[in-house]
Amino acid sequence: MMNNRNWRNRVCCFIAAVVLVSVILANEATAQGPLHGPSGEVILGFGTLEAAVYSPDGQRIATCGSLGAFLWDAETGAFVTWLSGHTDYVYCVAFSPDGTKVLTGSGDTTAKLWNTENGALIRTFEGHTNCVRSVAFSPDGTKVLTGSADETAKLWDAESGAAIRTFEGHLDWVRSVVFSPDGTKVLTGSDDKRAKLWDVETGAVTRTFSGHTDWVESVAFSPDGTKVLTGSDDTTVKLWDAGTGAVIRTFEGHTDWVNSVAFSPDGTKVLTGSDDTTVKLWDAGTGAVIRTFEGHTDWVNSVAFSPDGTKVLTGSDDTMAKLWDVESGADIRTFSGHVDSLGSVAFSPDGTKVLTGSDDATAKLWDVETAEVIRTFSGHTDWVESVAFSPDGTKVLTGSDDKTAKLWDAGTGAVIQTFSGHTSYVISVAFSPEATKVLTGSADTTVKLWDAGTGAEIRTFLGHRGGVTAVAFSPDGTKVLTGSWDKAVKLWDVETGAEIRTFSGYTDYVNSVAFSPDGTKVFTGSQDTTAKLWDAETGAEIRTFLGHRGRVTSVAFSPDGTKVLTGSADGTARIWDISEPLPETTATPTPIPTSTPAPAATPTPGISPGMIQLIERADLNDDGVVDVLDLLIFQSVWKEEVPK
């Protein structure tokens, strides 16, 4: 698993996003003031992006991804509203023909219908048994079409939510669905390498388009309904005669999967988006490439024309949506608010410097005030997975996939010690409170204690059955806390190396661990989307924190120990109040400052009620990009910005 570099790059991007947002807690407002979610959460970003579409009048843009669906003003790029309600990744979004409603499909197996004006949930369509990968409205807006990984497509009544018909016949996931312009036919694309044309009235298959050699990711009808367009993982796009099923033309030029296809409003052009990070505009009549739009840095998942055909909208795994001018190919606007890959980050104790670790095998020291690189630490031969400052800020510790950890002089950049002994990646590192010892956790399932002065190995902690993803010293330096892929958290005695206690209760990997400032509590985050607060002395679970939609990859206590922070792969960080005693039966949510009715509180013993903020925006300097500069402008973690 860890040897698959492409896979690891994806995971690293998710983890990096959470690491960054865990550090950036400044609650800056936008020009219109802070954005609020349905539970009063302050929205500070919009998660990873899967799709972007225009409203019929071209005034709005809808995007979707890891945090739900969002509406934007197409002219200004301003955020309009958040459609929050799905409990898993939102894969697809579509506007109704009159633009008053939005339809979304999710990994939670449902599709949802929303009011465009106020973001209110109108209806939920339930019936699929796997994630909903594609949604569409009929031309008159009275019906809804969904395609699912359960190998079916379903036709629904938009008004009542009743299922009208199920289209069965594909042998694998249904990736894409669309209505014909007259609404009498349905077109579906599937992982079985075929597209199928169905009769809406009878549900019968009227034609199967076979010819691709890999999954059919996207399908579209020409505006007059006489042609069909399909995009495939075989890197080609095919134009078909809808009446005969014959291939008219094959568009070749992409070098990776084609994820999205679209016709221009007049049907003379074809638009395609690919995993090769490019978007191509083609002449539908000749098959010639008119223009290639380059600017995304990751897979392009979604493409669309503006209603007047003069602009192109694209959505990418690089977390951005871009608006392009069709005539010139110019990048008009970028809709962003997310982080790309940073392996690990840390602030110096005095807050004047930032340390970053990267997959380029280096670590960099930055000046917070000037945003300039002070020093680059070069010496590792593989990704730098973890970084830390010594308590006095004079030394830097790095852990790498080259199986070593290195101790550096922060002032000169010189290597002081190299800690060699692990047999796999060094995933986590920490200094003891007095900085005389160093702790490393590795994918080899061990934790090692080292002498920072001599580089000698003092002790190896054995007991985990999976890679050790997180390590921490207790505030007094007498204990060590570790989290692992084996789903366990362990407390160890530094002096003897004995295992004191195992904290059990997670159903997936443990990603992050922390001690409270007084050392009496332990806080942990897991791949199973939960965080847990424990009594360090007894090992008893005090509280479970539910609310994240993705794995919890970063946790921390506030300096006074009254609040905890969780960062997640869902692109958000949440701040929770743990100062109040746990209610016996009811979780009391934060009051909702919007017109949307508050959901009824659900009796949930053992679950913390105190979520204060949901933090999702990371572009602190409002320059349209989220990068290390946004890290550098933050200097006061917790002390002033976190609500008291």
Image (cartoon, rainbow, N blue to C red):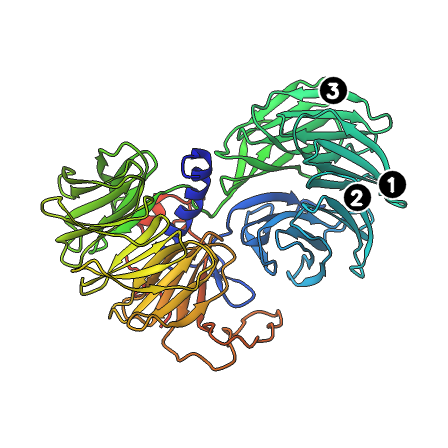
Please rate how many residues cluster around mark 1, counting C-alpha atoms within 10 Å: few if below 14, some from 14 to 19, many from 20.
Answer: some
State the mark number for residue 204: 1
Mark 2 or mark 1, earlier in chain: 2
State the mark number for residue 168: 2
Residue type, numbered disc 1:
Ala
Q: Quadrant of the C terminus?
A: bottom left
State the mark number for residue 249: 3
Q: Are the residues at dot 3 and dot 1 in contact (C-beta closer than 8 Å)?
A: no
SS type, badge 3: strand
SS type, badge 1: loop
Measured along the vertical axis of the image, is residue 399 above or below residue 279?
below
Q: Quadrant of the N terminus?
A: top left
| Distance Cα–Cα, label 2 vs label 1 | 9 Å
Q: Residue at x 56, y 23 (%)?
A: 255
Measured along the vertical axis of the image, is residue 490 above or below residue 154?
below
| Distance Cα–Cα, label 3 vs label 1 | 27 Å
